[in-house]
Amino acid sequence: MLVKVWVIPLLYLDFEIRREYIVANLCENRNRPQMHCDGKCYLAKRIAALDEQEKRQAEKTYMSRLIDQVMDQRTDFSFAQQPVIVELLPRAVFSLANCFTPRIAVDDIFHPPLV
């Protein structure tokens, strides 16, 4: 786990230590100094290759774990029926009021003052 954490910083350290050699021999833009690449293209390629390698490794690890889980013969599967427990709730009580019942709205509003 620590190796994975230290790969990128070590790649940068290697780049800083060997910068002159990389700029002089490995840089793609060494013939065009006006671009001021200074070997960053080489570093970017190395980081991209490292990311691609990590993706392939992760994919291989995932596939191997998946195959191990599928091919594991030690596990016994039982599909026994489990009892079903149903809890019945008390019935709701609904009251039905006729919507056509006349209502006197004036009685609700106008009434004698309360003393």
Image (cartoon, rainbow, N blue to C red):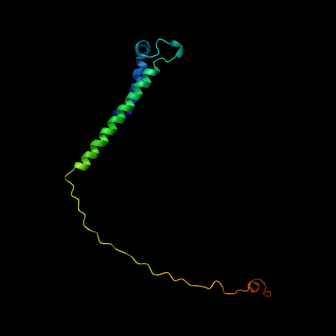
Image location of residue 35, percent across then percent down: 53, 16
Q: How many labels does the image show?
A: 0
Q: Where is residue 16 in the image (x, y as percent from the top left)?
A: 43, 20
Q: Does residue 97 sit above or below 15 in this rendering? A: below
- Relative to 68, does residue 94 appear above or below in the rendering? below
Give coordinates of residue 81: x percent, y percent: 27, 68
Residue 106: image quadrant is bottom right
**Quadrant of residue 87 in the image?**
bottom left
Is 106 or 5 nearer to us in this picture?
106
Image quadrant in which the C terminus is located: bottom right
> What residue appears at the point 32 percent right and 36 percent down from the top-left corner?
57
Spot occupied by residue 97 in the image (x, y as percentages of width and height)? 61, 85
Q: Which of 114 and 22 is in front in this view?
A: 22
Specify whether 113 is left or right of 58: right
In the foreground, 44 or 14: 44
Image quarter where the N terminus lies is top left
Q: Residue at x 41, y 27 (%)?
A: 47
In this view, 47 is above or below 29? below
Q: Is residue 78 left or right of residue 103?
A: left
**Which of the pair 4/45 is nearer the observer?**
45
Task: Look at 29% across and 72% down and name the residue there.
Answer: 83
Q: Is residue 75 left or right of residue 10?
A: left
